Amino acid sequence: MSYPFVLSQRCISQKRDMFLFCLQQYPVALMSGGWNLARHHISIETFYRWLDIIDDHYRDRNVNFQLRRINLTRLDVLRYVVDTADGPFLPRDSTEFLTPGVYGPFFADGQPYTGRVGNLFHRTTFQERERQALLECPGMPSQDPSFNLHNEMPQVIIDAAIQRDGGVCCVTGRADLPVIIIWVFPPSLAYESYQQRDSNKEGLHELYRTVENVITLCTELTGPFTENMFSVDFEDNNRIITFVDLPQVHPSGPPLILPTHLPRLSASKLFWHLHFKWSLRVHFLGGDASLEVQDPDPNDLIDELVEDRADPNDPKWHSGVGVEVWEEFLGQKLAATHAMYDSEDDEDAEQAMSASEDDEN
């Protein structure tokens, strides 16, 4: 399916077919999230609930906007504005399935909601965040031991989890697999989990270092869990949400398949909720092509056109950013030509009028 905007690599890799645009700079629209609805068969009500979870740090849930389909038109290369907003509003309590399309937030009177919805940038996974921290502090733990120290699990917590869970994986419900005791939400990220409206976040690291924040997990799922490939929506009867295909256990074997619901809820719902919120932000947010490095670079393409070096048969001019640069360049060139002719016509008219006045005199 074609869209009136360039699909970013993030959109393509996720096979998105539902796109959410924020309208903070209305009428300019910027993509702030999206789903592949072939994977996520969710109701409109569930989508709003997930969006509220994603935006919980920044948006007052009492702000009662609703989504509706929007039509976009290009303002410039990789920059789009709302042309029209048509179709009915999506009621927040609708149990109908969300359908593919391009959406924006509006109030009931038709005015755009110009507050923050979604985010232009997505979260990195727990594992990626840890790798970034290690790269930023290459001397760890000697230079900055805080990251590792916060995530170190005291033996007393490990012992308590072993006694509580009895070696049973909380996701598969099996006791015959190798398991590990793991944090649900890394204490090192505690400061990033607090609400922006909260006045005090001091001491959160230690509050997160509790047996209520650990689970027993089979080792095969440790990587996918810390890469936020799946999580648990405890508000939907502990339903397991798989965001991407899980890796194969063995190269020649089948991929991992999880149960539909968590068989046992050993950790606190608070920490499961934080894990779910983070995972939603990893997979839903972002996707605007203007924020990605483009290949080919639009500036290089413009130089080719200005210097008359462009080969119109080159495939790069027939898709993606190449099409937009080509069309914008030709449009501006045509506008400049019309302006020149209009100017010449005005000069001719002035000369004719002047000559007529001379004849009369």
Image (spheres, grey):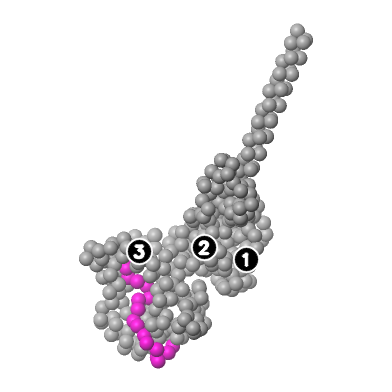
Say which label, 3 or 2, has the lower sequence index. Answer: 2
Query: Identity of the amino acid at label 1?
Result: Pro
Q: Are marks 1 and 3 in contact (CB under 8 Å)?
A: no
Say which label, 1 or 3, has the lower sequence index. Answer: 1
Magenta stretch bounds: 173-192
265 in the magenta segment: no
Could you tell me which residue is drawn at 61 percent across and 60 percent down?
102
Q: How many callouts does the rendering have?
A: 3
179 in the magenta segment: yes
Q: Is mark 1 on a helix, strand or loop?
A: loop
Quarter holding the N terminus is: bottom right
Could you tell me which residue is drawn at 55 percent across and 71 percent down?
46
Quarter holding the C terminus is: top right
Could you tell me which residue is drawn at 52 percent across and 68 percent down?
49
Residue 100: assigned label: 1
Badge 3 crowding class, 10 Å Cα cut-off, few under 14, some 14 to 19, many 20 or more, is few
Q: Which residue lies furthest to the left in this view?
A: 142
Which residue in the structure is indicated by mark 3? 132
Where 159 falls versus 144 (above or below)? below
Badge 1 crowding class, 10 Å Cα cut-off, few under 14, some 14 to 19, many 20 or more, is some
Query: Identity of the amino acid at label 3?
Result: Gln
Could you tell me which residue is drawn at 56 percent across and 45 percent down?
304
Is 274 positioned to the left or the right of 28 in the image? left
